[in-house]
């Protein structure tokens, strides 16, 4: 959505950054011009975080009004066995190691059945990369989840898993994607991208697909008609130049395919992994990351402040720094809780609504593809709603 330009707001914005290196960026932002990579660096270097946030909020309100989206979802992490040995990961295990597990399709489906009393519309399914899982395992997993709750949207498999599934399927990727869709796949989550820069890839996750291969896989996924999200893991050993390069590569692919629905900055959590000596981002870094993303990713409609990672007060603040989505109810989260996250593993739908209202925004329940399911009375009649699922 777009809102009408407001000359007073724009004049105030320009006045706020008068005489600073953000002034020319503000002019471009108001004119709706694309920011350059040099502008991205300026936003990262600026010592006026509030002004960066104000610019991002201006764009956020122009693109998404006052709305803050959420969904009622649950996560299923089907295995923590993984052969990629990423330095930032606290979730992966080897066979025989304490806590190693793989759910059978039936066990995964039981997680869905447990939540049948809740108004869940989406399941987010991701796991480690484990070559002993055959092609049929992935198809059966999707089918079992769909059988347990036919109405559920399955958002499953990062580009890294899609690449692995194609390897075990030994078929061309478009054919594999068609078969996954027939088995129930609805869209793909945005993980596995980390930082695309080859230097960081070589230092921390060299066994994983390259950034270029992640992008090439996402291109085919989008061409097959599936939508996906995208992410960047920040706050470890990457430079701001590498972050800007990552954002630029995402927006260039988005220019080609239009297939990314939302971007989610993922704040590195140090506990329990090989990079635990690194400090991780501060809350101010996290807010800046949201803001820079909103300003640079002019062609991605939604910026998600993933509350599980950010903690609730920062996710609320992020709604004034460029974010327009807080993700969902989640239910059972393992990747960040293995890395020391102190947030709860689930929230109730009403709590999400209260947090959003507490941040001064209008709550909108969406499905995975951003169809509106419910709006607070603040927005009644403004957004098309397909009814109240609650
Ligand atoms: O790919 C792993 C990251 C990702 C750590 O698409 C870590 O809607 C921080 O992608 N500290 C998985 N990050 C999560 C993900 C996601 C989450 C929520 C919503 C969506 C979506 C996607 O988590 C991994 C990796 O980049 N990760 N370990 C860590 N210690």
Image (spheres, rainbow, N blue to C red):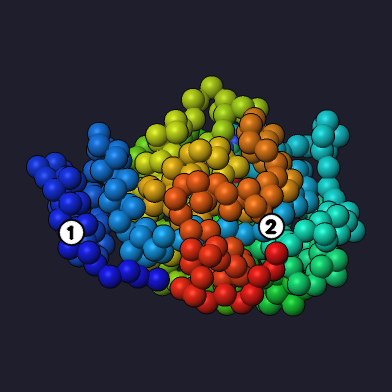
Q: Residue at x 25, y 43 (%)?
A: 51
Which residue is nearer to you in this view: 246 or 374? 374
Asked whether, in this view, residue 57 is left or right of residue 93, the answer is left
Image mark for residue 8: 1
Identify the secondary structure beneath mark 2: strand
Q: Tell me the quarter of the image containing the C terminus.
A: bottom right
Horizontal and vertical percent position of residue 364: 54, 63
Which residue is nearer to you in this view: 311 or 240? 311
Identify the secondary structure beneath mark 1: helix
Question: Is the CB of mark 2 within 8 Å of ligand 1?
Answer: no
Asked whether, in this view, residue 260 is left or right of residue 21, the answer is right
N-term-proximal mark, 1 vs 2: 1
Q: Which residue of the protein is positioned furthest toward the left in this rendering?
A: 19
Horizontal and vertical percent position of residue 60: 37, 58
Q: In which quadrant of the rendered view does residue 309 lie?
A: top right
Q: Tell me the quarter of the image containing the N terminus.
A: bottom left
User: Mark 1 Cα within 10 Å, few/some/many (few <14, many 20+)?
Assistant: few
Q: Which residue of the protein is positioned furthest toward the front in this rendering?
A: 377
Q: Residue at x 51, y 38 (%)?
A: 313
Asked whether, in this view, residue 66 is left or right of residue 331, the answer is left
Q: Residue at x 53, y 58 (%)?
A: 363
Compared with residue 55, is residue 276 higher up or lower down, i.e. above or below? above
Image mark for residue 73: 2
Q: Mark 2 and mark 1 in contact (Cβ < 8 Å)?
A: no
Q: CA distance from mark 1 to mark 2?
A: 40 Å
Q: Residue at x 47, y 47 (%)?
A: 359
């Amino acid at each position: 959505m777009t809102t009408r330009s407001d000359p007073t707001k724009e004049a105030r914005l320009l006045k706020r950054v008068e005489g600073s290196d953000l002034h020319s960026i503000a002019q471009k932002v108001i004119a709706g011009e694309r920011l350059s990579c040099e502008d991205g660096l300026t936003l990262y270097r600026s010592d006026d975080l509030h002004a960066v946030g104000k610019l991002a909020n201006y764009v956020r309100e122009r693109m998404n009004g006052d709305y803050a989206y959420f969904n009622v979802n649950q996560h299923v992490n089907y295995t923590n066995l993984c052969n990629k040995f990423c330095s930032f990961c606290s979730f992966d295990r080897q066979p025989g190691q304490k806590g190693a597990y793989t759910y059978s399709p039936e066990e995964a489906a039981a997680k869905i059945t447990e939540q049948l009393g809740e108004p869940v519309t989406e399941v987010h399914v991701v796991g480690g990369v484990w070559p002993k899982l055959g092609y049929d395992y992935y198809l059966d997993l999707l089918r079992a989840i769909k059988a347990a709750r036919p109405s559920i949207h399955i958002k499953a498999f990062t580009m890294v898993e899609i690449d692995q599934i194609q390897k075990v399927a030994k078929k061309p990727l478009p054919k594999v994607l068609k078969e996954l869709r027939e088995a129930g796949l609805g869209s793909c989550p945005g993980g596995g991208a980390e930082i695309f820069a080859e230097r960081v890839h070589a230092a921390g996750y060299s066994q994983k697909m390259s950034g270029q291969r992640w992008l090439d896989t996402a291109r085919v996924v989008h061409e097959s008609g599936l939508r996906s999200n995208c992410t960047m893991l920040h706050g470890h050993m990457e430079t701001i130049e590498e972050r800007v390069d990552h954002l630029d590569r995402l927006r260039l692919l988005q220019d080609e395919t239009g297939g990314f629905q939302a971007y989610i900055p993922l704040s590195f959590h140090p506990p329990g992994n090989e990079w635990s000596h690194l400090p991780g981002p501060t809350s101010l870094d996290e807010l800046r990351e949201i803001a820079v993303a909103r300003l640079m990713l002019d062609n991605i409609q939604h910026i998600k402040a993933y509350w599980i990672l950010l903690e609730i007060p920062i996710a609320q603040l992020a709604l004034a720094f460029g974010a327009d989505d807080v993700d969902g109810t989640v239910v059972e989260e393992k990747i960040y809780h293995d890395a020391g996250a102190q947030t709860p593993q689930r929230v109730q739908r009403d709590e999400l609504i209260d947090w959003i209202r507490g941040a001064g925004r209008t709550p909108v329940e969406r499905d995975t593809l951003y169809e509106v399911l419910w709006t607070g009375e603040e927005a009644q009649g403004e957004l098309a709603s397909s009814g109240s699922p609650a």
